Image (cartoon, grey):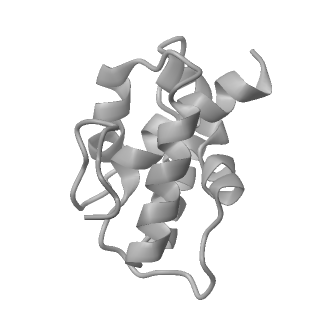
């Protein structure tokens, strides 16, 4: 799988992980957000099972995206990445529950971050 496919897969998962947990001190970048989700790649593509490293990364991403600016950055990043890869949407929607991440979970990628 190519780098762009990986980034696309990761993007959809990030949308599902934005929550109301404590923020890190620095703003998160798109690259950082995608790096958190690297262990989730096979699960999000529908070719593997959920794993402990995946949940650790997803929980870390949720904690890192508390500010509205961070959430906007991550959503826009994921929207762009999700255009290039086919993600198992059922798995992506299950990720927050399976990894015990609380908070609002967007159902679709067409969220308007400017609103």
Residue 32 x/y as whole percent: 68, 58
Task: Point out the residue furthest to the front here.
Answer: 114
Residue 30 % position (x, y): 64, 55
Q: Quadrant where the C terminus lies?
A: bottom left
Between 2 and 40, the residue placed more toward the observer is: 2
Q: Is residue 84 left or right of residue 92?
A: right
Q: Nearer the viewer, residue 3 or 92?
A: 3
Measuring from the top left, give residue 25's x and y in whole percent: 59, 88
Looking at the picture, does residue 92 appear above or below residue 64? above
Task: Work out which quarter of the rendered image holds the N terminus and state it.
Answer: top right
Q: Residue drawn 65% across and 34% down?
A: 7
- Residue lying at 55% horizontally and 49% vertically, measured from the top left: 77
Q: Looking at the image, which residue is at 22% across and 38% down?
A: 107
Q: Residue furthest top?
A: 47
**Quadrant of residue 9 within the rendered picture:** top right
Q: Say which residue appears at 35% left-offset and 74% top-offset.
A: 21
Residue 108 % position (x, y): 27, 36
* Residue, far right: 2
In the displayed structure, 50 sits above or below 49; it is: below
Number of numbered markers: 0
Q: Is residue 91 above or below residue 115?
A: above
Q: Is residue 99 left or right of residue 38?
A: left
From the viewer's perspective, is residue 103 above or below residue 1?
A: below
């Amino acid at each position: 799988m190519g780098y762009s496919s990986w980034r696309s897969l990761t993007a959809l998962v990030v949308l599902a992980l934005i929550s109301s947990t404590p923020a890190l001190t620095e703003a998160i970048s798109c690259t950082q957000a995608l790096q958190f989700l690297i262990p989730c790649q096979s699960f999000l593509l529908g070719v593997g099972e959920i794993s402990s490293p995946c949940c650790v990364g997803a929980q870390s991403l949720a904690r890192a995206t508390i500010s509205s600016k961070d959430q906007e950055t991550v959503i826009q990043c994921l929207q762009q990445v999700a255009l290039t890869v086919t993600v198992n949407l059922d798995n992506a929607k299950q990720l927050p529950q399976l990894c015990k991440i609380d908070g609002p979970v967007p159902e679709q990628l067409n969220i308007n971050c400017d609103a």
